[in-house]
Image: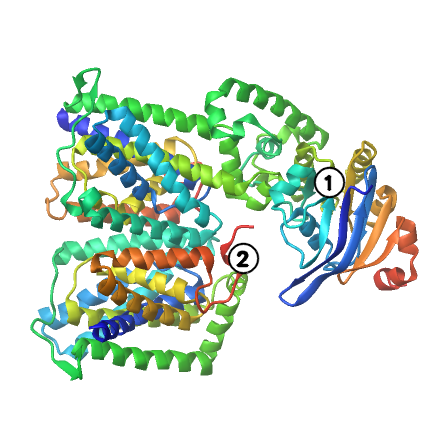
Amino acid sequence: MSVLVLDHVSKAFDGIQAVKDVSLTFEHNAVTALIGPNGAGKTTLFNLICGFVHPDEGAIYYRGKNITGLPPWRVTRMGIGRLFQDVHLFDRLTVRENILTAFQNQTGENPLKAVLLRRRMLREERSHNRRALELLDFVGLADKADDLAENLSYGQQKLLAVARVLAVDADTLLLDEPTAGVSPALIPDLLDLIRKLATSGKAIALIEHNMNAVTNSADRAYYIADGEVVSHGSPNEVLGNPTVRMHYIGI
Amino acid sequence: MLVQLLANGILSGCIYALIALGFGLIYTTTRTFHFAHGAIYTLSAYLFYTFYSLYAWPVWVAVILATAAAALAGILIDRVIYLPLIRRGSSRLVPLLSSTGLYIVIVNFIAIVFGNNTKIPSPGVQPTLVIGTLVLTRSQLLALGSFVVLFVFVLVMLRTTSLGRKIRALRDDPELVSALGINPLKTRTIVFGFGSSLAAIAAIISALDVGIDPNIGLAATLTSAVALFVGGVGILEGAVFGAFLLGTLQALTIWQVSARWQDAVTFLLLLFFLTFRPQGVLGRRHRSDEVAV
Amino acid sequence: MNYLFQVLTIISIYSILALSLNLLIGYTGLLSLSHAAFYGIGAYIGTLSGIVFGLSFFPCLLLAIAGTVAISFVVSLPSLRLKGDYFVLASLSFQTIVFVVLYNWIAVTRGPFGLTNIARPTLFGFSLSSDFAYFVFSGIIALACLGLLYLIGHSPFGRLLKAVREDEIAVSALGKDITRLKVTAFAIAAGFAAVAGLLFAGHVRYLDPTSFTLLESVFVVSIIIIGGAGNVSGPLIGTVLLVTLPEVLRFVGIPYTIAPNLRQIIYGLLIILVLRFKPQGISGEYGFE
């Protein structure tokens, strides 16, 4: 069974049809790429899944449950993590704090418990701090743990965002252009990570413009243009599709 | 009785409308919550009082000087306080807070110079016009006349001049305001100057009607804000519509409830709109403006 | 000496107000102009509980906190969806409405006639009628409040509030309910304001609505602007500075008639200057940008 399903979803903004009757499925243990020109509606599809935007028509199912119309925080709690194209870091918090906010079910998130169950909160904080440093180490930002997020370079900020979404520990990850802005030396490791996440059981949805990234890490792809699905299949099949080639690659 | 109250309501609506029109022009064009608008209102009233009652200058001289001073003050406030903040990239709350600070400074300065008690520039009973059971004072007629003339002027200006076109473009797309960064300086100058003049005229008419004290400006700011947000934010006509709605509502409140609860009714109305219809009666939805995702 | 204890008591009371408002403005980034309303509601509920039901201080305090927090939900639930100017306006509206109610609901609050001759609390049979005793009492309660606010702020909850200030979208994407966070912060701030209110009533032993106006809300906001927001030192420094300022003016010999106005002018100028030249205030962590 597909873990995440979009069923005939449509969305218009101020009269402009951003998404037209789109149906997609995402599977466990697989990386599914969404590719296509800028402005084709890919990020809108992610926003629809997360609940930042509600569809005009159609429905979205996660693990069989209809999640259409749920607020974003609930969608995340159900197991869907989101990486934004425009990062959305907490600028004036430290790198470490950015990761710490991502852990789920923290005792100290309830102010009453933060006061009355202080010792338990502090114990959790210590273990979360350890985990946060592991994640930061993995993306190479451990030495910047106490710097403010706004002081990182753009590439570093993207890596921080990746580490943060990993901290959410979601079953399904929506990654919007994770490699954009990241220094080329680090991209292979990042793609490697994405593949490992998939093989460990997660469902990964990937929006990418980097075609190498797509062909090397994605199991399946959808080509989306003008808000519609033009082609889908394995990355090579999709990129070999004549309409796609003409449209996108210009051959 | 009801007719008289409604007439009173509509005519106080004219005063509110003049103030709100100025406030709304400024807010719509520059997205600045010009809290100090009320301070300019107070300042104009006291300047008029000084020129007319203390120096005994002719009334038209006093009016023109007070209005000109108000326009100048408005422009200065924009240049000295708001523009530096905007150039620095402040959020909208910082000019609002600075504006509030400025209001406090100006009003208390006036209180020190003139004292806290009420002054009456034009003592004695006013001449009135009687139409059937309606009694209209000279001030009310002045308010009506000024409002009609100035409102028509503004409407014509909006629709026919290039300045008007710029203002309408900016009101329809607040994003454009921030995208443009700083408004062309000339537009801001005209808007602050003219908006402040409207407040001055309202202040003078009101001064001749009920007198002045240092606190009249707060009600002016708050009433114009309520009028603008209830009537319709993106639209100047909204400010005017809201002003008359408020005037009428207040009159009805006085009639049915009591004068003392006016402010509660005014702000309950605002709360209602902010909660259920943030774009006001006449406004259009700008989702980015008001609701957190 | 008594005079000193009175000033210190006022400092204790305002430090509670400032540090609780800091949770809203400094941490969550919500500019609330209704703090004085909760200050007043707490003062009235607490005092009236004592007068009408004859309860002693701590039960009155609990009722004051409970009542004020309950009323805070009435405000926060509808208005916390609003952003920027709109939220400020909503808080301003609520503040004005509360003032009008306190002023005109004479049957309950006695409006402008005020509640007079409020008794000082009696602890363990010992009446706190001396200025020194009441200062010690307020000081201890203030320290307790400050301690609680510190614990609340230095926690994942506090961290999330700051995250809300930075980027609400990201916070929801991390699975955290923003509305619940904001409503909770609002309720906590209101609860502490109520404590300050009851302490105030016991200090001046007289309550009338003119202590709880919009300008009073603005005053507490200016403590945070001038002293600094986000951390603990900022609001505390702001409190001490702005509370002792009128006393300093008095010593310098400013005439009685213009002193209140001059004090306001200084506050106003400080707000403008701080926002323009030092947005994080004297000692704040978070600048008003």
**Is residue C130 shown left or right of residue C281?**
left
Q: Residue furthest left?
A: B124
> Where is residue C267 shown, x and y percent of the image?
27, 45
Q: Quadrant of residue A182?
A: top right
Q: Is residue A247 above or below residue C35?
A: below
Q: Is residue A124 above or below residue B155?
A: above
Measured as percent of width and height from the top left, residue B102 is found at 30, 54
Q: Is residue C40 visible?
A: yes
Q: Which residue does the image show at 35% across and 33% down from the upper left?
A: C66
Q: Amino acid at mark 2?
A: Ser
Above or below, comparing residue B202 to residue A9 in the picture: below
Secondary structure of residue under mark 2: helix
Residue toward you, C126 or B170: C126
Which residue corresponds to mark 1? A173
Q: Which residue is mark 2?
A: B288
Quadrant of the snapshot with the N terminus of chain C: top left
Question: Callout 1: few (<14), some (14-19), or many (20+) C-alpha neighbours within 10 Å?
Answer: many
Q: Residue at x 75, y 42 (%)?
A: A64
* Residue C129, horizontal then vertical, whole percent: 14, 23
Protein chain holding label 1 = A
Task: Identify which residue is drawn at 27% across, 68% down.
Answer: B70
Q: Is residue C32 above or below residue B86?
A: above
The answer to whether residue C10 of the structure is visible from this angle is no
Q: Is residue A105 left or right of residue B86?
A: right
Residue type indicated by callout 1? Leu
**Which of the chains bears the disc numbered 2?**
B
* Percent of width and height locating residue B232: 43, 66
**Nearer to me, C47 or C209:** C47
**Toward the viewer: A64 or A140?**
A64
Q: Compute the Cα span from label 1 to label 2.
A: 27 Å
